[in-house]
Image: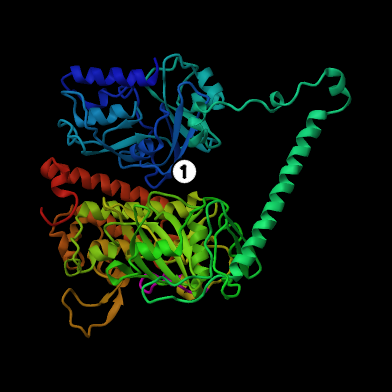
Amino acid sequence: MPPRRRLLLLLLALACSGGGAAVDTAPGNATSSPLACSELSRVCTAFLAFPAAGNASVLQSMFDASPADLTSDPAASPGYAFVRKNCSCLASRTYLANTTYTVPSAVPLNATAAQVAVAAYAGLAVPPPGGALQRPPRPGAVVALHLICGCSSGPWNYLLSYVGADGDTVESLSSRFGASMDAIEAANGMPGPDPISTGKVYYIPLNSVPGQPYAAMSSALVPAPAPIQNTLPEISDHHSAKFPYGWVIGGMGVALALIAIALLALLMCKSFHYNHQGSNNQRKSPNQPMPHNFQLLKSGSFCYGSGRYFCCQFGNEKQSRKGGGDHHINVPKGMVVDVFDREKPIVFTYEEILASTDLFSDANLLGHGTYGSVYYGVLRDQEVAIKRMTSTNTKEFIVEMKVLCKVHHASLVELIGYAASKDELFLVYEYSQKGSLKNHLHDPQSKGYTPLSWIYRVQIALDAARGLEYIHEHTKDHYVHRDIKSSNILLDGSFRAKISDFGLAKLGVRSNDAEASVTKVVGTFGYLAPEYLRDGLATAKCDVYAFGVVLFELISGKEAITKAGAVGASSNSERRSLASVMLTALRNCHDPTCVGSLKDCIDPNLMDLYPHDCIYQMAMLAKQCADEDPVLRPDMKQAVITLSQILLSSIEWEATLGGNSQVFSGLVAGR
């Protein structure tokens, strides 16, 4: 039976039933049980095979996954999406991964929230223990779930969780996934080639990542191009046997095309040279924007680097020829090679930038960064944030362009485009409606902001952790951000966090790499790891330290450099790092019962509305991240897993209090 049909029949059965235990409603959960584990600290990469070829954004939301975590098997019928997850040994002594599910607007009658949520995952999910999910589902409610995954104990790199379908056999699974029949039987504890039970979860041992990039799932909808040989004139066997005319004709065509492209590029370069020399450099009136010599890239243009300069080729643009010499932006050698070799951002004109910011009026000023000011603007009917930098910050401009053109994640601010004038550079980002995390933590009422609830703080921490995990581990080139702080964590309209400001990012190095180059210490005091200040060696563990300080900020509401005394201390109190203050307070805290004695260290804006065990777990995670020894700090994968568990526990805590998470989730005001 096709998986979609099986899921539909399940939902119909739910509509006719009177409820029942959630674990008995999802296909196969009566016979499926997670793998047992003994090492509570063990974490591994696992995959789940979801029988769907739907919208990638839906799968990302369902499985709390990034685009890079999705692959597909377009050749399978039905198609499968493979989802990469961090699988861990939970307190239940079983391997599980965490996710959340938003209940849709249309749900079956007489079904519980757990039944609806588990059914959506076609047997890959089970509800967490407890009865909070046995009430009727509320459309829009967020439901916490465990995904059934596994960590390999044999000679395999990964385990793939697969729900058995009608007609499956050990032999067919072996053929489909390239695993031996013996390996499948060993991974599932099968004494022999037993029949595959429909709806039961099986673990397929793999040595490589399954499937292809997820975009391949839509390739079946695109007609295949006609074979090249069909487009050539038919040649008799007599001639083709003597001489390969088809190859000669094809090769000549390619050569002519390359020559034409080279000539066109040469003409464009000459055109740019003459036009660039004649640009106007005089301001006509105080109310008119200043003309600029640095001509902007147009659609279809490209840049290339050479030595200390980069040259930009442009489309035709009429310019005044009244004076003005060549103008190049000095760029350190090697910085611009392949800046635009991946994603090509939109190029805006200088006039568009001026108009969108109302000539950079103070009313549009959002804040000041390390290397420039940020303004609100509306470009082509889209709200944006525009970073305004001087041409002396070309290095930071190029670094940020290079990083953001290559990395894309829901927890990283997206680069939309850029622009330049004679003396200034501009980066255009997606707009974060709620501003920075810093504004919501440190005396928010005086700044016109509303304090954040506990749930929002945990979700923000998890979002930021996922963004860091992505650049540390999942990009082709691994990066170290080097300036993680609460002001560089921005919040969108739904208070989801996005990491910004990659101007100081560097390629990552291993902590034990003795040959790694020592760099100039940059960043913000209060967030800098001790070994970075001492040795100047930037590693991913430096970002982990800074993230630990952000966690301390989320708990305490205090700034990274704070006064040593308690809240309300005199103005002449000694200023200390928040990390040292919090680590001292947590020195003798060994279980959640100590949270009451730490009240002075917990943000009073939380109004005591938080679960003690969860705030204790976050404090312990922050303590580990801010450990003086970088070897003892967790990596961001471990931080993501811990924060996922804290978020799920926090959601369950809210459910036990009111039954409606919207009463508690969100902002503190209006509770």
> Where, quadrant-wise, is the N terminus in this rendering?
top left
Q: Residue 414 colored magenta?
A: no
Residue sitting at the far bottom: 572
Three-letter residue code for mark 1: Ala
* Viewer-proximal residue among 537 and 216: 216
Task: Tell me the element at label 1.
Answer: helix
Q: Quadrant of residue 198?
A: top left
Which residue appears at 16% of the width and 59% of the height? 606
Query: Residue 9 appears at what percent x and percent y?
Result: 29, 17
Report if residue 537 is visible in the image.
Answer: no
* Viewer-proximal residue among 65 and 168: 65
Give the residue number, with chain letter if any, for mark 1: 68
Q: Residue 524 colored magenta?
A: yes
| Left/right of residue 667 with respect to residue 234 in the rendered view | left
Q: Main secondary structure of the magenta part?
A: loop
Query: Residue 386 appears at what percent x and percent y?
Result: 38, 63
Query: Residue 338 appears at what percent x and percent y?
Result: 60, 57
Residue stretch in magenta: 520-531
577 lies above or below 643: below
Which residue appears at 38% of the width and 74% of the height? 525
Query: Residue 2 appears at what percent x and percent y?
Result: 40, 17
* Viewer-proximal residue among 336 and 45: 336
